[in-house]
Image (cartoon, rainbow, N blue to C red):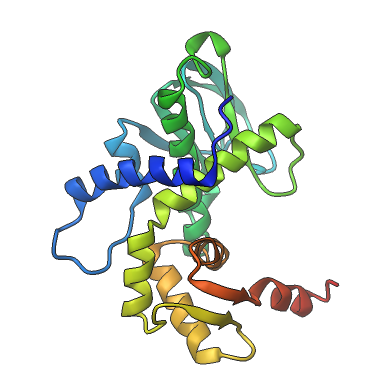
Amino acid sequence: MPYLSKIDIEAIANRIIDQYKLRYIPSKRLCYRVDPIELAEMLGLSVYFRQLSYDHSILGMTAPDEVMVPIFDENKERSIFILDGKTVLIEACLNHSPKAKGRRNFTIAHECAHQILYRLYPEIYGPNQRVLCDYRRNNAPRRKIEDWEEWQADALAACLLLPEDAVKDAMFVYGLGDKVKVLSRKYSEYKYQCFCEMADALGVSRSALSFRMEQLGLLERNELIAEARARRGVG
């Protein structure tokens, strides 16, 4: 498994997004949004929505080669789906609620990221390896090696969904300027509302956008997590 740096991952994403913009984004458009379904299509991938586990803990699946995986119907009856190396499976419940849009889009991008890494490193993710990558909710346990693979896919997904130029353009359009000093729901309600509108326009969750802005050096202090914990009474 390759151990890629953040710089490596950013460079991979930039090459992919350059191709995406040529195909899908008008040249004069100021602010653009990456549609993960279009991204998957550009990569030659088919996206299907199915129930992937009894408890909905598995959010997405993909594999570099043919692998049989279980799926479930509305009565929790089990059947088999064949991943063919060009397919992404996404948990169906993510496609049913507008509130899940950010998670849905990130999960699709995450599975696309796995497919990109398969193609860049076929000697590691070759057909003889029988690799199955499934994306789980945060509280689902994993082995450390899987954690690293998932971290790389998460990092690449963030770069794909939120390219630096798209984030900077959106900050300008939504009145956030060149940099946000403090992002706080409590102390800067207007700026927070602008930020929420920006996240919705980009099709991502607020947490994904705030983390990406921090990574790009566009947000100095992020108070959203601490404020959310305080509202839940978590120390």
Give the image location of residue 72, x and y in percent: 59, 33
Q: Quadrant of residue 108?
A: top left
Residue 53 visible somewhere in the drawing: no
Residue appearing at x 62%, y 30% in the figure: 77
Give the image location of residue 149, x and y in percent: 61, 34
Q: Is residue 142 left or right of residue 153?
A: right
Task: Give the total of numbered labels.
Answer: 0
Residue appearing at x 42%, y 82% in the figure: 176
Q: Is residue 65 above or below residue 32?
A: above
Give the image location of residue 140, x and y in percent: 74, 42
Give the image location of residue 34, x and y in percent: 33, 54
Kindly give the residue lying farthest to the right in the view shown: 235
* Foreground of the two, 220 or 160: 220
Residue appearing at x 56%, y 90% in the figure: 188
Residue appearing at x 27%, y 68% in the figure: 31
Kindly give the residue lying farthest to the top in the view shown: 128
Q: Is residue 113 left or right of residue 226?
A: left
Q: Quadrant of the C terminus?
A: bottom right
